[in-house]
Amino acid sequence: PYCYVVPHEAVSFYGKDFGHNPVGTGPFYLKLWRDGEKLVLRKNPNYFEVDELGNRLPYLEAVSISFIPDKQSEFLEFVNGKIDFLSGVNAASKDELLTRSGKLNPKYSAKVKMITGPYLNTEYIGILVDSTKLPSNQRFLLDERVRKAIALAFDKEKMMLYLRSNLGYPAYGGFVPSGMPGFTDVNYGLAYNPLQAMQLLEQAGYSSKNALPEITVSTTDDYLDLFEYIQNQLSLVGIKLNIDVLPGAAYREMLANGKLPVFRGSWIADYPDPENYLACFLTDNFAPNGPNYSHFSSVQFEMLYRKAMSLTSYDQRLPYYHSLDSIVTSKAIVIPLYYDKVVRFTSARVDGIGVNPMNFLVLKKVKVKSIK
């Protein structure tokens, strides 16, 4: 995380090996690290925090971390009680561990706890709006009505229920996720409405006689199921969507160089401030120099952003953040798909593991009880 304190003397002493010899002020210190095999943390007896009763933290004497590359093996170790903690849900074990609606399978309720909460990650469709970069046969994407029609044409709630077992929140708000302090789902008028989508296409000059040209969305194979669903939904309003599945490296290279007119993107917060999301739309951050993959540019946006950055109080900046988010979302520069969800599983003997929107693993108040 940003701004964690480390001693410059240790960094100078270890140099490039500092990562394997970390020195800090946390609740645990590194005792053992065998690459790819095991990592052991021990209780820091000099840790400065205490609990509400004055007991020194952390409670745990040690933490043992295993490295199991095969997710199915990891799951079996967990259900057999050899691992106390799992983060996230792997596709191979999802149907066994969860119900269709995303709840813990009742067969595990006696020995497993499931903990969920908002995660500051927005999954979205991005649209290139740079006329100098768009191929001539894709210039229709510059029409705001066409972009809005795409956003209105698919049902995010059903998408999350049937394809993600509700392991995420349908994105009815803006690009900044609803788990961000001060942000909730705001109605930008782009909720599922296929009739309005067809009306917008007609207003833009596209009908059954003059069909909208085909759109190609680029993604990686782990999101193929989502886009096959969106493809089907868009076809019902007269939009033909092709799906281009790219290898991860090729996808990232083409995205960074403005070669993808429509693309699947995600943004995980580096720090819990909306600015981290909104900087993705600054002109100075045009890809490949930054994360403005849509090449969106707006004088009004830049002015409001500079004003927000001149204010030191989060509460003072918040109204500007809402306005900035409204600009890019209401114009459908990006179409948020869903806001991610932290999903954690622990054995029944573990208490004190909560969740937080940055998905940091905080173990200082964790206790492990013996189960007879």
Image (cartoon, rainbow, N blue to C red):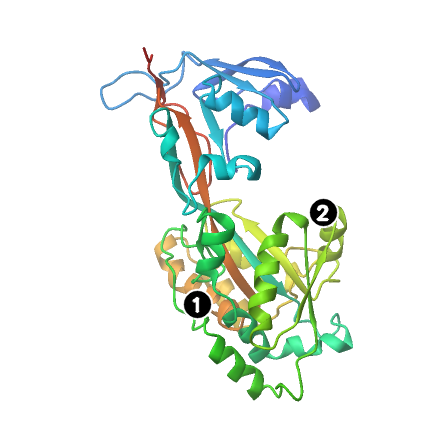
Three-letter amino acid code of the residue under disc 1: Ser
Q: Which residue is mark 2?
A: 248
Direction from residue 6 to residue 20 in the image, left or right = right
Q: Quadrant of the C terminus?
A: top left
Of the numbered discs 2 and 1, the one sitting upstream in the chain is 2
Residue at position x 56%, y 25% from top? 74
Three-letter amino acid code of the residue under disc 2: Gly
Q: Quadrant of residue 233?
A: bottom right
Query: How many badges with numbers are in the image?
Result: 2
Q: Is residue 142 visible?
A: yes
Q: Relative to the observer, which residue lies in front, 29 or 122?
A: 122
Q: Is residue 311 above or below residue 33?
A: below
Q: Is residue 274 visible?
A: no
Direction from residue 187 to residue 163 in the image, left or right = right
Q: Determine the CA span between mark 2 and mark 1.
A: 33 Å
Residue 152 placement (x, y as % from top left): 50, 72
Residue 241 placement (x, y as % from top left): 66, 68
Q: Which residue is mark 1?
A: 323
Q: Is residue 328 above or below residue 356?
A: below
Residue at position x 57%, y 56% from top? 226
Q: Relative to the observer, which residue lies in front, 365 or 7?
A: 365
Residue at position x 38%, y 41% from top? 103
Residue 288 placement (x, y as % from top left): 72, 56
